[in-house]
């Protein structure tokens, strides 16, 4: 499959970046993969810059995609509905992710997803820093996919002993605090070493912290490494006046997904422009943009965030 001409240009070319609220009509649609449409899924690209790519993906009950997928960056899946079963085709690691959870897919992971549920599988996905090469490799033979074969597995995992290949990398769950930011759930380079494994993240194993002392809100980090930060924001309602967060600013590009409630995005350096991010909308913010969340509603706001970490 060849790359699309809008890759790296959404919502604007790299030299013309500015904030933009992306509605459903702004999404670019293609199927993965058009060579085998009967075994494909619907992909919507909403953000695609020189640092960050993000969008939506939908797959019906019982479906899978035909080709083994692999990216030039780390990927995260925020599962909005349904059930996802994801197979790492080299290591044989197979993980289930349910609605409300996130799957971390390190760079180099040869992955293939399945929907064994009875409802549509809807995912908010993000990749940093790069998505695909100019033409994707579709030569991974199905016979080499490491799965159940009547109790036998003769696949040679790069000369790694079976007992070693089955050892999951250290998952640092005992001490979870802000000192681990940048290396969570494992350091990025370690996560990308063979054999590669998945990490299913949720409210039980995430890194939770507070942003702001005067105007506190909760942040849950599912991934924080040298390529990206990804997680969930939660801004409660109530307080003196409208509930507002303190200022955020990130070096890399940001994509926000509105999950629950109408989130107002305020830009303190450009107060003439504010954006109401409805449920299902995606907000794009270039690197170094200062922004705040405002809750004008009577209910808490919840959404997902992904920040690219520029590669030095």
Image (cartoon, helix red, strand yellow):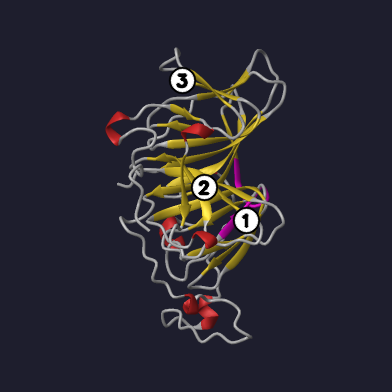
Q: Is mark 1 on a helix, strand or loop?
A: loop
Q: Are marks 1 and 3 in contact (CB under 8 Å)?
A: no
Q: Mark 1 points at which residue?
A: 174
User: Could you tell which of marks 2 and 1 lies nearer the N-terminus?
Assistant: 2
- In the displayed structure, 203 sits above or below 265; it is below
- In the displayed structure, 26 sits above or below 79; it is above
> Residue 296, located in which quarter of the rendered image?
top right
Report crowding for label 3: few under 14, some 14 to 19, many 20 or more residues within 10 A (C-alpha). some
Looking at the image, can residue 199 be seen?
A: yes
Whether residue 297 sits left or right of residue 56 in the image: it is right
- Distance between the Cα atoms at labels 1 and 3? 37 Å
For residue 267, the mark is 3
State the residue in front, 181 or 57.
Answer: 57
Q: Mark 2 points at which residue?
A: 125
User: Could you tell which of marks 3 and 2 lies nearer the N-terminus?
Assistant: 2
What's drawn in magenta, residue-wise?
A: 199-208
Give percent across and percent down for residue 42.
52, 50
Report crowding for label 2: few under 14, some 14 to 19, many 20 or more residues within 10 A (C-alpha). many
Give percent across and percent down for residue 294.
58, 21
Looking at the image, can residue 184 be seen?
A: no
- Distance between the Cα atoms at labels 2 and 1? 28 Å
Report crowding for label 1: few under 14, some 14 to 19, many 20 or more residues within 10 A (C-alpha). few
Q: Are marks 3 and 2 in contact (CB under 8 Å)?
A: no
> Residue 193, located in which quarter of the rendered image?
bottom left
User: Could you tell which of marks 1 and 3 lies nearer the N-terminus?
Assistant: 1
- In the displayed structure, 51 sits above or below 238; it is below
Residue at 72%, 21% in the rendered image: 298
Give percent across and percent down for residue 140.
42, 72
């Amino acid at each position: 499959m060849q790359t699309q001409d809008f890759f790296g240009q959404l919502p604007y070319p790299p030299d013309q970046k500015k904030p933009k609220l992306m509605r459903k009509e702004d999404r670019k649609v293609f199927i993965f993969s058009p060579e085998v449409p009967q075994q494909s899924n619907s992909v919507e690209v909403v953000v695609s810059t020189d640092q960050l790519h993000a969008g939506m993906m939908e797959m019906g009950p019982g479906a899978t995609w035909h080709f083994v997928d692999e990216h030039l960056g780390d990927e995260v899946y925020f599962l909005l509905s349904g059930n996802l079963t994801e197979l790492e085709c080299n290591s044989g690691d197979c993980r289930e992710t349910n609605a409300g959870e996130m799957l971390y897919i390190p760079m180099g992971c040869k992955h293939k997803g399945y929907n064994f549920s009875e409802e549509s599988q809807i995912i908010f996905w993000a990749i940093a820093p790069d998505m695909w090469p100019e033409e994707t490799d579709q030569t991974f033979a199905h016979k080499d996919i490491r799965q159940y074969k009547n109790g036998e597995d003769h696949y040679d995992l790069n000369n790694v002993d079976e007992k070693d290949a089955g050892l999951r990398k250290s998952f640092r769950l005992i001490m979870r605090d802000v000192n681990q930011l940048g290396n969570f759930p494992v350091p990025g380079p370690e996560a990308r070493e063979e054999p590669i494994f998945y990490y299913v993240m949720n409210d039980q194993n995430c890194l939770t912290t507070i942003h702001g002392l005067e105007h506190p809100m909760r942040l849950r980090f599912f991934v924080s490494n040298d390529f990206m930060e990804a997680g969930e924001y939660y801004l409660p309602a109530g307080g003196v006046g409208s509930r507002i967060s303190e200022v955020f600013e990130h070096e890399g590009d940001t994509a926000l997904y509105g999950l629950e409630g109408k989130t107002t995005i305020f830009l303190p350096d450009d107060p003439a422009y504010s954006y109401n991010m409805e449920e299902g909308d995606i907000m794009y913010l270039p690197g170094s943009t200062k922004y705040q969340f405002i809750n004008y509603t009577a209910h808490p706001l919840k959404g997902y965030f992904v920040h690219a970490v520029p590669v030095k």
